[in-house]
Image (cartoon, helix red, strand yellow):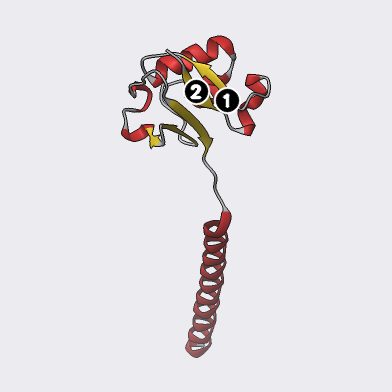
Amino acid sequence: MAIEIRIPTILRSYTGGAKVVEGAGDTLGDLLTDLDSRHAGLKARLVTDAGALHRFVNVYVNDEDVRFLGALDAKLNDGDSVTVLPAVAGGAFGFAAAAAIAQHSAAAAAIAQHGAATAARSAAAVR
């Protein structure tokens, strides 16, 4: 059973620089075990010590996210194509989140300053 696995740039040091490697297995877990026997250390970059896919790794079988196919128990067939992609954070959403946090921080500082000024006026009025 030959299954093609597309390897992201960040993990190609484990495959000798190869972008695509072949492996075998009835399930994704079996395939990763087979890959690790040929490319030592690769499985540890994809699977946690508890035996689940790392949450920052996305794996697709024939363009279907394996999280919806049974994760490591996802069934594989001869000729399937598996793509490994590291999750990417940032981009436009990252900038929007940073802007929202900055706005929130500025609003919180203004509220705190207003509260301090109100407290100072109240204290002065009591004297």
- The image shows residue 6, relative to residue 123, as above or below, that is above
Q: Amino acid at mark 1?
A: Val
Q: Would you name the residue on which mark 2 appears?
A: 4
Rendered residue at 52%/15% (across/down): 35
Tell me where residue 119 appears, x and y as whole percent.
50, 80
Q: Quadrant of residue 60?
A: top left
Label 2 environment density (alpha carbons within 10 Å; few <14, some 14–19, many ≥20): some
Residue in the foreground of this view, choosing between 92 and 123: 92
Measured Cα–Cα span from mark 1 to mark 2: 7 Å
Amino acid type assigned to the residue bearing label 2 in the image: Glu
Q: Position of residue 24 (x, y in %)?
A: 45, 13
Residue 33's label in the rendered image is none
- Label 2 SS: strand
- Can you give x and y, in whole percent of width and height, for residue 27 in the image? 37, 18
Which residue is at a point 31% across and 28% down the rendered structure image?
70
Furthest residue in direction front, as rendered: 79
Name the element at disc 1. Answer: strand
Residue 41's spot in the image, x, y percent? 58, 17
Q: Is residue 65 above or below residue 50?
A: below
Name the image quarter holding the N terminus.
top left
Q: In this figure, which residue is indicated by the disc labeled 1?
A: 20
In the rendered view, would you say 46 is above or below 68? above
**Residue placed most toward the observer, 74 or 46:** 74
Q: Are marks 1 and 2 in contact (CB under 8 Å)?
A: yes
User: Which image quadrant is residue 71 in?
Assistant: top left
State which tag comes first along the sequence, 1 or 2: 2
Which residue occupies 32% across, 35% down?
Answer: 68
Q: Residue furthest top?
A: 37
* Residue 69 against residue 119 in the figure, above or below: above
Q: Residues within 10 Å of mark 1 (few under 14, many from 20)?
A: some
Q: Name the residue nearer the viewer: 125 or 114.
A: 114
